Amino acid sequence: GLVRSLLPDSMVGRAAPLVVSLAVLLPFAVLLDSVLAVSRGHHRMAPTVAIERIARPAGQLALSLAALAWWPSVLGLGLAWAVPYVPALAAAIRATPQLRGRVAAAHVGADVGVAEQGEFRRFLVARTFVSVSQILFARLDVILLAALTDTRHAAIYTAATRFVVVAQLIQQSIGTAVEPGLARAMGSEDRALLGTLYKTGTSWLVWLAWPLLLMCAVLAPWWLRVFGRAYVDGVHVVYVLVVAMLVSTGIGTVETLLNMAGRARSLVFYNVIGLVLMTGLDVVLIPHLGALGAAIGWAATICFKNIAPLIEFRWTIGLHPLSGAWVVAAIVAVATGGVVPLAGRLLWGEAGALAGAAAGVALWSAAVWRRRGSFVGGGAGGRRRVSPMTD
């Protein structure tokens, strides 16, 4: 009924089988995420990396290529994307022995009190709300832009903001790697280890994300042209959001830490205020500035959603993301991702910018290799040699 109400009658027959198939396979995708979260909760990263990051995408790619060759249709490609979640879930359950016993279940009633159950519910509600709000942050401004201006501005804005997805993937990767260690440090109230992991993960983010973001800004007039000459009008959108993402990646996984510290209500509050802030700025700015107004609204929200939790985390826990490793990473990133490509652009135009970007990548690679053993930030009680990939 929903499909028939949303689509023209001529398309219902083609869309309905795909919608039904995806609805049947959706629980497998949801359960896969939950099962892998259990394995990470027991400090095991291998299942997430092997199944979710490697095997499932590889299976989707292989099936998509097969569908293009033998079943080139919307239904065929849709199933090629969705079906790999089924074997991935089976592999995840097999790789998570904690799900194949009744020991934990037998002791739940005895060991978990009312207070712990309430804390868990608050944590779960906060994470669920944050996940839903992330979808709104990524889509609501595009809808408002199309409604308040036209589809041309929405298309330019959508293309100009694609680099944000790449930066967010880097954030997600680093966050996934350090979350088990952060949870263990928070649970044991080991502030020194917590500070070390937080600073280490943030310095990794600066090393990996900042050069990419700065190069996106310097090379924006050229890479936007890939979508079409009209899309170069989105260059100012890129500049505004690059600044916001530099702030976000420079602060690190502070929202996750705040949730782990039992400040779930604060996290929900910041996300609600962020949605109100973005919506309000969009409604006011988009009619006058178009896509740039939407970028300002999203950038302001990104900054608020990171700076406000950082202030509270600093005030309540006493930790911050800055360290000597962070400063070194920032200097190298600005030099290799910003200064060198920008100098080439100012001196020799497009060719100089591309040559500067290539030189920046080479210099950045050399710097990473030289400092590969010193990406660890000092914790609250001094330096601890901890790798974020194993803790």
Image (spheres, rainbow, N blue to C red):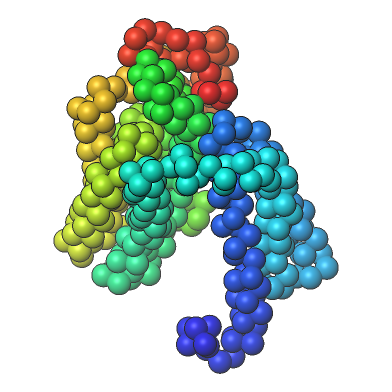
Q: Is residue 275 left or right of residue 175?
A: left
- Residue 191 in the image: above or below residue 235: above
Residue at the spot 63% in from the left edge and 60% down from the top edge: 28
Q: Disc count in the image?
A: 0
In x, y percent, where is residue 148?
A: 26, 70
In x, y percent, where is residue 135?
A: 40, 57
Task: Identify the residue at the far front of this view.
Answer: 110
In x, y percent, where is residue 205?
A: 44, 28
Task: Identify the residue at the far bottom of this view.
Answer: 9
Q: Is residue 302 left or right of residue 57?
A: left
Residue at the spot 23% in from the left edge and 60% down from the top edge: 279
Residue at the spot 66% in from the left edge and 33% down from the top edge: 46
Residue at the spot 60% in from the left edge and 39% down from the top edge: 39
The one of 187 and 300 positioned closer to us in this rendering: 187
- Residue 332 in the image: above or below residue 148: above
Q: Is there any visible trace of residue 355 in the rendered image?
A: no
- Residue 143 in the image: above or below residue 318: below
Residue 362 found in image quarter: top right
In x, y percent, where is residue 268?
A: 28, 50
Task: Identify the residue at the far right of this view.
Answer: 70
